[in-house]
Amino acid sequence: MVYFLSFFPLLAALAAFTCSSDRIRPWIIPFTAVLHSAGVIAVIFFPQAGSNTSWLVLDPAGKFILSAVSILYLICSFYTVSYLHQRKERPNRVFTASFCAVIGTITLVIWSHHLGLLWIAMEATTLVSAPLIYFNHSKRSIEATWKYLLVGSVGIALALLGTFVLAYAGIKGGLEPTMVLDGFLSGAAAISKPWLHVAIILLIVGYGTKMGLAPMHTWKPDAYGEAPGAAGAIFAGGVTSAAFIALFRVYQIAVSAGEFQFISRILTGMGLFSMAVAAVFMLNQRDFKRMLAYSSVEHMGILAFGLGLGTDALFGTFLHITANMFTKGLLFLSAGNIQRAYESKHTDQVTGAILRLPFSGSLFLTGFFAITGSPPFAPFISEFSILKAAFTSGRYFSAAFFLMFLMIIFIGMGNTVLKVVQGNVPEDVVQKRYRERPGIIWPLFIFLALMLLFGVYIPPAIKEMIYNAAGCLEHII
């Protein structure tokens, strides 16, 4: 099944690239998404269909993240069809092919238990997702694409170096030469600690660049600001989740080797620093899509902070992956609709969005309250769980900084969002023909329903998946 879920999207991308009709081509995306989701469901309910090998293993953590990413991709795929049909002035061949391919490479990252294959899949994800940023063919979009590729290349180079150093640390400790995760976990106690420390730092910086942790986040504001809404949602929820699972593999090895305190200090420090950077740049932010990019920097920081806290925060950390994913889906899609209606993403030109676009404007405001941790939405539950773990583990100063940054971000983000949704609609915007259509609205309500569901009541089956994912480390921390 892993071969189907990884390589069928690549065949679909090839079909999209060779298809001659701009109108028919976008429908290949939801076709790919439906088959991918069906395959993920089959793997969840029939684990034997997974066909695991030593290199390819879908463990509980991977199963949970893959399920969430597949849902995100499925919802965005139907939105993308309506979006592309409204953008008839733009050829969609490359965009459609890239959109199909990205879910295949993300799947391979999640499934990989061979660190070399993991690195290859992560780099492939970067390469196939880059054209999504350049869809509008503007000067700023090509600049954002190159920045994404260049910064990502530096990060992936450091990750490759870290992978080699990790392999050498194992050999130095007397282990058989291996790049397989289980080989490192079983012989972790013998790994050379000095070399392991070097590998951990390089890998965190490398894969942290892909996540967008500060200070390696510099590609995010430009890439998220220029990418179409659906592509932004895939970056913020899918690509970053793939990078998180890569970082999680490093975390598993470090903890198994008895280096929890070492990696914990790095992750909690980088997590809080990312939140601090996001808080600074969100103050008086006038570009509401760049604001969402800095929000992503913040939430990647929350994930790193929660992971660094250890066992008590693992449930909240994995829950926050989905909470952030679905909320970002709502925010990026609604922001994309607002940008299309106003032909701008700056608060100087965008006011009165609730009056101009009642659904998108209202849901954009709702998404703001959700992503900043307001009840009764999912991010409130996940962030509260992480904060509780910080207090339980006696990290009172870290918890205080965590709360302070959340407060600053709420104020800064609220200032931008309220400027967008309140006020009068500019006269020139009233005359524009853009209108909200069902195809670009109903996906937003699906994301809203998921945010509320995970905030009010987590189904037992989902809760069990989260506990199983968190349990990947409980026996070794």
Image (cartoon, helix red, strand yellow):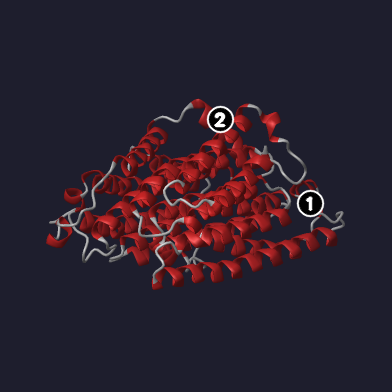
- The answer to whether residue 413 shows anywhere in this view is yes
Residue on which the image places disc 2: 464
Residue at figure coordinates x 45%, y 72% from the top left: 143
Residue at figure coordinates x 63%, y 65% from the top left: 156
* Residue 10, placed above or below residue 70: below
* Residue 289, placed above or below residue 51: below
Left/right of residue 241 with respect to residue 417 in the rendered view: right
Q: CA distance from mark 2 to mark 1?
A: 30 Å
- Discs 2/1, front: 2
**Which quadrant holds residue 115?**
bottom right
Left/right of residue 200 with respect to residue 413 in the rendered view: right
The N terminus appears in which quarter of the rendering?
top right
> Of the residues shown, which amino acid type is indicated by label 2?
Glu
Task: Tell me where residue 378 appears, x and y as whole percent.
Answer: 40, 40
**Which quadrant holds residue 91?**
bottom left
Badge 2: how crowded within 10 Å, few (<14), some, or many (20+)? Answer: some
Q: Secondary structure at mark 1?
A: helix
